[in-house]
Amino acid sequence: MSQSLTLARPYARAAFAASSQGGRTAAWSQALGLVARIAADPRVEALLKHPQLSSSEAVALLAVDGADEDFGRFIGLLADNRRLPLLAEIAGMFEQLRAEADRIVKARVTAASEMPAAELESIRLALKQRFGREVELETAIDESLIGGAVIDAGDVVIDGSLKGKLSRLQTALAS
């Protein structure tokens, strides 16, 4: 995995630089996401790895309607260098670069049950104050947490779940 991230990093940076020049990061983000999902399909993935598939055929397979010419050349570059299997990693890194440039922190709130919108907004505002950036929240449900929530915002993890508290109590008692 780390090798694929190492290989994907320069392509993600190049894609971000190319898309930033014309203010097209949102369009490239959508196109990269779509192409990455297409390339992740097991049948398409097998085709892309086939040694007899030419670069132009691979580009045609992954063509996105409405994508600009530079995006098409970028996909062609990936095809020429046999890096199409890295599209998921490239798209993920592109999104990280875009969020950093837009000064956005993406946070995931995992709770034992669905949280009310007002509570999520309160969490978003508290994280915005803590990081000094806009915060985009993603929610998930994990019933094993019993109660409370776990907030994962990049390098910061705040475990306010009942499961986490019980685990910390168990560790403290065992010591």
Image (cartoon, rainbow, N blue to C red):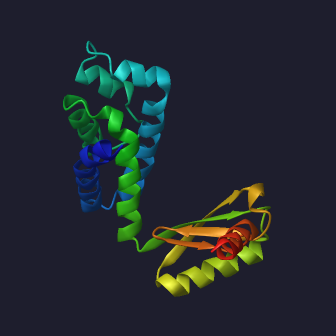
Would residue 51 appear left or right of 166 to someone viewing this image? left
Q: Quadrant of the C terminus?
A: bottom right
Quarter of the figure with residue 114: bottom right
Q: What residue appears at the point 31 percent right and 33 percent down from the top-left corner?
A: 84
Q: Quadrant of the N terminus?
A: top left
How far across and down, in percent of the image, does residue 83 sit? 27, 34
The count of marks equals 0
Establish if 18 lies above or below 52: below
Q: Nearer the viewer, residue 68 or 35?
A: 35
Q: What residue appears at the point 61 percent right and 82 percent down from the top-left corner?
A: 125
Residue that protrudes farthest toward the front in the picture: 175
Establish if 47 lies above or below 152: above
Q: What residue appears at the point 31 percent right and 28 percent down from the top-left corner?
A: 59
Residue that protrudes farthest toward the bottom in the picture: 129
Q: What residue appears at the point 74 percent right and 70 percent down from the top-left corner?
A: 166
Establish if 112 lies above or below 91: below
Q: Nearer the viewer, residue 72 or 129?
A: 129
How far across and down, in percent of the image, does residue 78 sit? 25, 36
Would residue 15 appear left or right of 145 to someone viewing this image? left
How far across and down, in percent of the image, does residue 99 sit? 41, 66
Would residue 135 appear left or right of 118 to someone viewing this image? left
Would residue 43 appear left or right of 53 to someone viewing this image? right
How far across and down, in percent of the image, does residue 22 sit? 27, 59
